């Protein structure tokens, strides 16, 4: 089992460009999450999903959109990247009340 | 806003010593979880303690929870160089979301 995988691992964007981050899990988890981690800080929840076809906003959703068309995939989109979105992005999945399993992260730089 | 707050922010000890990290939070919780993050990598779940539990053990890890004080502690006994990492507490709220602290950076000196 691969667990949680994220694509790409690194990306550099120019301000105003768009991109999509892909998260995939093979554990049949219902819940999936997108977080960002900035230096010296804990994780902040961007968006999450409690099942296929459903999404909800987290703590810092502005500037991001998500989709969960298939149970195993959770996509995070940046429509018009800004330097403030430079961060490390982590995807995670879980069975409802249990521990979360994390992907290796995507390091995004917006110039 | 971040709810879990770890203390200390950084901790440096000799290999073989015990390391204690504390976490405080503000509201009612379903459970409290501790995670480890090695530099530049994803987080790994260590232990989960439910709101009706007071203490839990897993190998060299011991976690306590005091819901009256809204605090938890993580004890790592007989530390090893491989324990060098950042440790995060996260509280699960009634919506099953995790709210994270800023972490404790632990350095084990050989």
Image (cartoon, coloured by chain):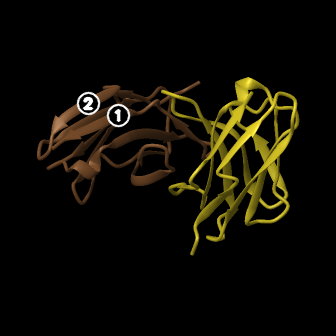
On the picture, is A28 further left or further right than A20?
left
Asked if the residue under mark 1 is in contact with the one under mark 2, i.e. CB atoms within 8 Å, the reply is yes
The mark found on residue B47 in the picture is none
Q: Which residue is drawn at 61% across and 62% down?
A: A4
On the picture, is A72 further left or further right than A15?
left
Q: Mark 2 points at which residue?
A: B11
* Residue B22 in sight: yes
Position of residue A40 measured from the top left corner of the image (x, y, whole percent)? 48, 27
CA gap, disc 2 and disc 1: 6 Å
Q: How many numbered circles does the render carry?
A: 2
Q: Colour of chain B?
A: brown
Q: Name the residue under label 1.
A: B105
Q: Which of B110 and B70 is in front in this view?
A: B110
Position of residue A50 measured from the top left corner of the image (x, y, whole percent)? 72, 54
Q: Chain A is drawn in which colour?
A: yellow
Position of residue B102 measured from the top left corner of the image (x, y, whole percent)? 46, 30
Q: Mark 2 lies on which chain?
A: B
Q: Quadrant of residue A102?
A: bottom right
Q: Which of B45 and B49 is in front in this view?
A: B45
The crowding category of the residue bearing disc 2, from other C-alpha atoms within 10 Å (few below 14, some 14 to 19, many at least 20), is some
């Amino acid at each position: 089992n691969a667990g949680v995988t994220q694509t790409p691992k690194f990306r550099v964007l120019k301000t105003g460009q768009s991109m999509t981050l892909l998260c995939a899990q093979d554990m049949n988890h219902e819940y999936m999450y997108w977080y960002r981690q900035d230096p010296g800080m804990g994780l902040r929840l961007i968006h999450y999903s409690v099942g296929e076809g459903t999404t909800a906003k987290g703590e810092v959703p502005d500037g991001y959109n998500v989709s969960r068309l298939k149970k195993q995939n959770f996509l995070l989109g940046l429509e018009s990247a800004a330097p403030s979105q430079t961060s490390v992005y982590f995807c995670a999945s879980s069975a409802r009340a249990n521990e979360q399993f994390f992907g290796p992260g995507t390091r995004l730089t917006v110039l | 806003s971040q709810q879990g707050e770890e203390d200390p922010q950084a901790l440096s000890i000799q290999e073989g010593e015990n390391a204690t990290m504390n976490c405080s939070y503000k509201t009612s919780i379903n459970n409290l979880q501790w995670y480890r993050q090695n530099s530049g990598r994803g987080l790994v779940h260590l232990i989960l303690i439910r709101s009706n539990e007071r203490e839990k053990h897993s190998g060299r890890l011991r976690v306590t929870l005091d819901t009256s004080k809204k605090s938890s502690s993580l004890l790592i006994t007989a530390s090893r160089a491989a324990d060098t990492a950042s440790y995060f507490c996260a509280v699960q709220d009634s919506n099953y979301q995790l709210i994270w602290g800023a972490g404790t950076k632990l350095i084990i000196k050989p």
